[in-house]
Amino acid sequence: MINFSKILNSIMTEKNLNANQLAQMIGVNVSQVKKWIIGQSKPRYKNLKAICLALKIRADVILGLKDK
């Protein structure tokens, strides 16, 4: 199973987004997004939901449960 950080990186690359842009879109500090990207931490439910809404993806995709 692919881990969250790799999936997040892949989706951000596809959508041509950087950590600063995603942080602004979901209302968190850029340092938090960078931790998710390098796999140092994972988002809590409310942030995961915000990521899904901002990136227009389903939670099962970003969690690696299903292909796009």
Image (spheres, helix red, strand yellow):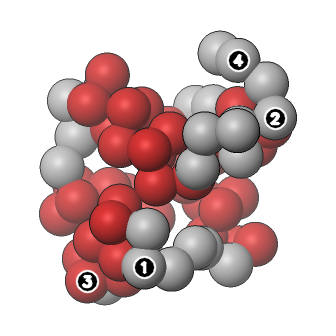
* Real-space Cα separation, disc 4 to disc 1, in angstroms: 23 Å
- Crowding around mark 1 (Cα neighbors within 10 Å: few <14, some 14 to 19, many 20+) is few
Check residue 31 in the rendering and tell me which mark sits there, or answer none: 3
Q: Which residue is mark 4?
A: 67
Residue 16, image x, y percentages: 20, 30
Q: Which residue is mark 1?
A: 40
Q: Nearer the viewer, mark 3 or mark 1?
A: 1
Residue at figure coordinates x 26%, y 83% from the top left: 31
Whether residue 10 can be seen here: yes
Nearest the eye: 58 or 37:
37
- Crowding around mark 3 (Cα neighbors within 10 Å: few <14, some 14 to 19, many 20+) is few
Find residue 14 and report its image quarter: top left
* Real-space Cα separation, disc 3 to disc 1, in angstroms: 11 Å
Q: Secondary structure at mark 1?
A: loop
Amino acid residing under circle 4: Asp
Q: Secondary structure at mark 4?
A: loop
Residue 33, image x, y percentages: 35, 70
Q: Are marks 4 and 1 in contact (CB under 8 Å)?
A: no
Q: Which residue is mark 2?
A: 65
Nearest the eye: 19 or 54:
19
Mark sitting earlier along the chain (2/3): 3
Q: Is residue 64 left or right of residue 42?
A: right
Q: Secondary structure at mark 2?
A: loop
Residue at figure coordinates x 38%, y 32% from the top left: 10
